[in-house]
Image (tube, rainbow, N blue to C red):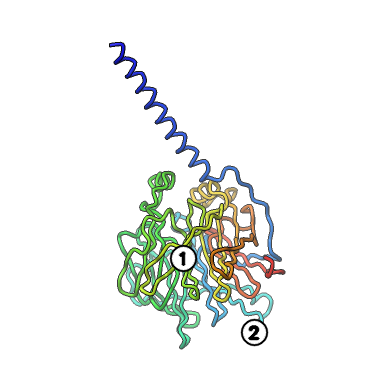
Amino acid sequence: MGNNATFLHFMHRFVFWILFAMVTCFVLRILIVLDLNKRIYNHTPGPCRVLTEKYKGTAGLTFVESQKRVYVTLGYGKSHNMTTKTGIAFYNTNRTDGRSQQEMHDLIEMTINWNGYEHQNLFIPTGIDSFASSNGRILLYVINAHPDHECIHFFQVDNQKLNHRKSVCDSSFTSLQDLTVVGPDRIFFTNMAAFGRGWAQVVEFALQTGQGVVYYYDGSKLSIAAPTVNAPTGIGYDSKRRILYVGSLIRESLLAYKVAKDMSLDSMYEMMLLTSPIGLFVESKSGDVWIAAHPVLHESAWHYSNPERKNVHSSSQVLRIRIQEEGNSWVTTEPYANDGATISASSAIVYTDDQMIIGSSFGRLLHCDLTNSHIT
């Protein structure tokens, strides 16, 4: 009896300390993920101005070089029960076409011809990318973030109009985030988590189970390009080097994949950013990667839970990663950072001709001039 009691006592203590260690590790992991130790110091690369704060969200941006246009998705806040208009607009970055100073900062809304699409009233655009063909044809690819109708819409640009071409929808789309175009109607895109939102998604993130997915669509067929990715968010493609970049919200990192000729992915390396990337922009000439990020995740979580509250902000940050010539090293700078008072929850970024345009999840679209872009 004495030996049995001693053994049971030992086992009880052993199980207790194992469970205690597991719970402690879980709590510490959550505390680290929430960035409770971080603080943001405001700075800009030059003069900045608000282009619009009319819409509840300017969450997606894409740049078309041949048109000098930045296309902007409007109204992401509607997916979080905010009252706002949704749609797509463009901003003209050309400063040599004789427009007035006021006209240079105008955002032009586009009309959409849905061609009989039956779910047009469920359109809440977020991630966006573009393809420009050699004959001048401009195609836009847009993620629809409506909780009941997550799809990818295909549009063709006709001056200030959009013609809806088709949609790709699937029951596995639970939390679509961003997409990047690798050819006409060929796209990679991210699905952040197995659960769409709510406490189930919070638990999934806390456990870091890696249920996110990178999909590939080849124009007719959908396939999984990279399974079990930990909360993939922003995505961008370097067509010259054939490198696909994928941001990870929870790991606060940027994953790099080599894209083979058959469009399969081979993991290359992971850059630790110490911030949560949301939107990516890859410069076509230099291959530099620009990242719009949420640097303090507990602020972002509170902001996404209370987007209507004006006193609740989420810090914003923009990183620039210069990939070195050998391709396996890089230099990271921080052109922009803000505590959320000017722009809250930065979610998209475009850089062109010493101009930087920053989109946000639920609010403003910001334009900044870079006074010293070569050192930014």
Q: CA distance from mark 1 to mark 2?
A: 29 Å
Q: Position of residue 220 (x, y in %)?
A: 30, 74
Residue placed most toward the observer, 329 or 209: 329
Seen at 38% across and 61% down, the residue is 226
Q: Nearer the viewer, residue 4 or 36?
A: 4
Q: Are marks 1 and 2 in contact (CB under 8 Å)?
A: no
Amino acid type, label 1: Gly
Relative depth, front residue between 367 and 259:
259
Q: Which quadrant, please, contains the N terminus?
A: top left
Q: Quadrant of the C terminus?
A: bottom right
Q: Amino acid at mark 2?
A: Asp
Q: Residue at the spot x=66%, y=67% of the render?
A: 368
Residue 50 in percent (x, y) is at: 63, 65
Quadrant of the rendered image containing residue 144: bottom left
Above or below, 17 relative to 314: above
Seen at 44% across and 57% down, the residue is 232
State whether residue 296 is above or below residue 129.
Answer: above
Taking the image as shown, residue 90 lies to the left or right of residue 202, namely right
In the picture, measured across the screen, residue 303 lies left or right of residue 214, that is right
Question: Helix, strand, or loop for circle 1?
Answer: strand
Few, some or many C-alpha atoms within 10 Å of disc 1 (few <14, some 14-19, many ≥20)? many
Query: Which SS class for mark 2?
Result: loop
| Residue under the point 60% across and 48% down | 311
Residue at numbered disc 1: 127
- The residue labelled by disc 2 is 97
Q: Is residue 113 left or right of residue 291?
A: left
Q: Give the residue furthest to the top.
A: 2
Question: Could you tell which of marks 1 and 2 lies nearer the N-terminus?
Answer: 2
Q: Nearer the viewer, mark 1 or mark 2?
A: 1
Q: State the image quarter where residue 358 is shown.
A: bottom right
Question: x and y percent of residue 29 in the render?
Answer: 48, 41
